[in-house]
Image (tube, rainbow, N blue to C red):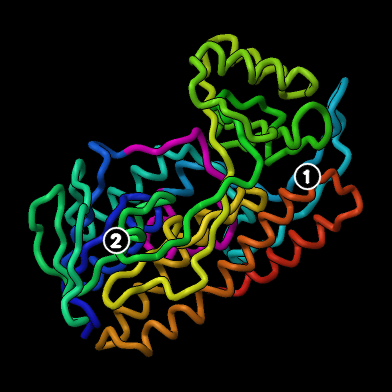
Amino acid sequence: MTAVRKVAIAGSGVAGLAAAIQLAKAGVQVDVFEAKPELGALGSGISLQGNALRVFDALGAWDDIRAAGFAFEGLNVRAPGPGAPVVAALPDVKTGGPDYPAAMGMPRPELARILLEHAQKAGANVRFGARITDLDARANEAVAVTVDGEPAGEYDLLIGADGLNSTVRELIGIQTKPEPTGMGIWRTFVSRPAEVERSELYYGGPVYIAGYTPTGEDSMYAFLVEKAQDRFGVSDEEATRIMLEESRAYDGPWNAIRADLEAGAHANYTWFTKHLVEEPWNRGRVVIIGDAAHSCPPTIAQGAAQGLEDALVLTELLVQRDAVDQQLWDDFHARRLPRAKAVVEASVQLGQWQIDGNRDADAGGLIFGIAQQMAVPA
């Protein structure tokens, strides 16, 4: 017996699809409503820590994800300037435990495709071009969902996994919203030089951080973190020019990255945001998870992992309990709020130290401490 028999999910990102997979596997009727007309994934690549990989295994998707990505151990820190010498080779805490790599990079579209396939295989119904526009939670017994102005049915639960600008969050009256942190990031998807076998970061030079992460045998994504600016109206050609110019202080594999940019690799730009809903994430039988509930800069690459953990913990409780009651919500928040808060605060602090130019801050100690916390299953 599960606590729910019919569930609606807003959003087809990692958190939404992870929840869909677990619920559908348990025999729950699941309808996923995605506002976009087709499966899409912004950005070029994604870094996944071991605790995210542990969730993928629980979903039954780990074998496919491992085959589509590039697993690695550790992190290199390089200096800007001629030769880009490696000044530190740092080990990673295996946050997923000994059975998983410390980290993995992979193309975002591949991750989205694999999770969608597993959700549909499990029996979830995924509708694209379908935006939830209203809801009516009736006496804490059911939720009536409206999609694009038309009634879509009643559900035992609505999960809002609809991202940073969540409609569900707004519909249930939660006022917390993402705020800029003061940093912006350029990303591009390029070929992988053979010497790049793990994530590498460069501190110093004209931007806060320059780096790249391998995502496959022949691919990687590269990024430049700068002071947040109004870059959103620039043309593709101007975006490429900016990324080329800002990267010229960085040698080594950045020479190959620039060659790919000059050959037509696309550059995209976003701002880092931060927010955490510190009040309960649910209002009756409507709950938000993932980026709808919390966001942070990717300074410790835990954003996707936290959304995946939200989904895993929530669905575990829904499948193991026989009622959606206050005890379920208390247990969910006790397991998720402190953990998400620790990640958000640490990620924001690491970025702020960069903005402030604080050279005395113990960034390594903060990262290691959070990694140790994440190594304990959610």
Task: Out of 361 and 255, give the one closest to the viewer.
Answer: 361
Crowding around mark 1 (Cα neighbors within 10 Å: few <14, some 14 to 19, many 20+) is: some
Comes first in the chain, label 2 or label 1: 2
Q: Identity of the amino acid at label 2?
A: Leu
User: Which residue is at a point 66% across and 25% down the rendered structure image?
Assistant: 193
Mark linked to residue 354: 1
Is residue 174 or residue 144 the one in the foreground?
Answer: 174
- What stretch of residues is rendered in magenta? 40-64
Magenta stretch contains residue 48 = yes
Q: Position of residue 115 (x, y in %)?
A: 34, 51
The residue nearer to you, when weighing 53 against 316, is 316
Q: Is residue 200 above or below residue 366?
A: above
Q: Tag 1: residue type?
A: Gln
Residue 343 at x, y percent in the picture: 62, 63
Residue at 40 percent across and 65 percent down: it is 174
Q: The residue tagged with tag 2: helix, strand or loop?
A: helix
Residue identifier under label 2: 171
Q: Position of residue 100 (x, y in %)?
A: 57, 60
**Would you identify the image quadrant in which residue 203 lies?**
top right
Left or right position of 369 against 306 = right
Q: Is residue 184 above or below residue 179?
A: above
Residue lying at the far right of the rendered structure: 360
In this view, 221 is above or below 168: above
What is the number of callouts on the image? Answer: 2
For the N terminus, which image quadrant? bottom left
